[in-house]
Amino acid sequence: LINRGPIPAHFTLTPPNAHVAYCFKFSPMKGVLESGETKTIQISYKATVLGAFDEEFQFSVAGSAKPPILRIKGCVEGPNLHLDIDKIDFGDIAFGMPYTRTFRITNTSTTSVTYKLRIPEDGSGFVVTCAEQIRNNTDPSWRKGIHFYVEPKEFKMTPCKGTILPQGHQDIEVTLCSNTVMEYFRYILVDVEGIGEGLLAVNVMGRVIVPRLTAYPDILEYDECHLKEPYERKFLIVNTSHVPGCYGLIAQKRKEDTPVFYSSPAPCGIVPPFSVVEIPVIIETQKLGEYSTQVL
């Protein structure tokens, strides 16, 4: 502001009523200019909406009928984010097995962009993996199955939020560990801070398969055994499916009158696709006689 008059000028900014005008900040907004004095006004602008703007700002000056007017115009452009793929297809996956795919977000804007990823249909509860389950063959889930009070959070995105520098990119890992036998058709939504939600989307698909595992032979003959002496036999777990399978030899519930104790040094494990694993079973007879015991 320049005072070209012969006397001091008292000035005050008169803000307009337009919504976009509140995005501007002037410092100082009022003051006094001596005759011939020049004062620099700093203007800050923080955009809240996209598109062009054209605003006029008036400074009322005491004793002046014609206020000085400052016109500010410009255009607010949104961030330019791009995805290298539009869908992620996990294909056929096994129950409780984590699978990971990747995609990339690229920022071609001239400013940094802060993003956040989310899958609206995903749950928030704890997810069970086969790697965790096979650590304990006494877990109740082996007998009763997996039950949830809260839908499990089956998807994990790393990193799920962050800031991408201008002309930069971020690689995202998407891990799916399904605890539900179903076909997936979900969307990963990309929210951009200060701009909007769901500006970009990646379709996620997959089908959960529970492989059918078979035991061979289905009867183990131990023949004659001495009382309370350990005897070992082995049987096979066969997986004819194209996805891995998780197995567990359920821990025996022993009672005082249980005639035969059985156990295994390798009760749980994972059978790869189209593979066979060998399971040792050790028995100890507790009573004389001939017995048949079912191993689950």
Image (cartoon, rainbow, N blue to C red):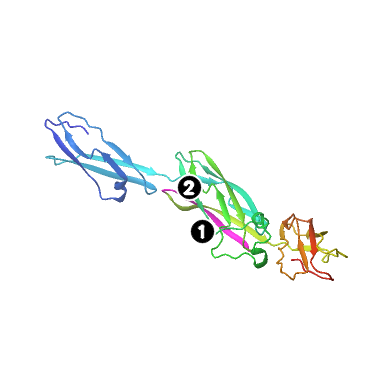
Could you tell which of marks 1 and 2 lies nearer the N-terminus? 2
Gap in Å between the C-alphas at discs 1 and 2? 16 Å
Which amino acid is tagged 1?
Answer: Pro
255 left or right, relative to 173? right
Residue 150 locus on image (x, y percent)? 53, 63
To which residue does mark 2 refer? 115
Q: Which residues are magenta?
A: 182-194
Residue 189 locus on image (x, y percent)? 51, 54
219 left or right, relative to 102? right
To which residue does mark 1 refer? 120
Q: Residue at x 13, y 33 (%)?
A: 8
Residue 65 locus on image (x, y percent)? 14, 41
**148 vs 98, nearest the viewer:** 148
Q: Is residue 52 above or below residue 227?
A: above
Residue 66 locus on image (x, y percent)? 16, 41
Answer whether residue 195 is visible to the viewer in this image: yes
Q: Quadrant of the C terminus?
A: bottom right
Mark 1, other Cα within 10 Å: few <14 / some 14–19 / many ≥20: few
130 left or right, relative to 9? right
**118 vs 151, nearest the viewer:** 151
The quadrant in which residue 153 appears is: bottom right
| Circle 1 SS class | loop
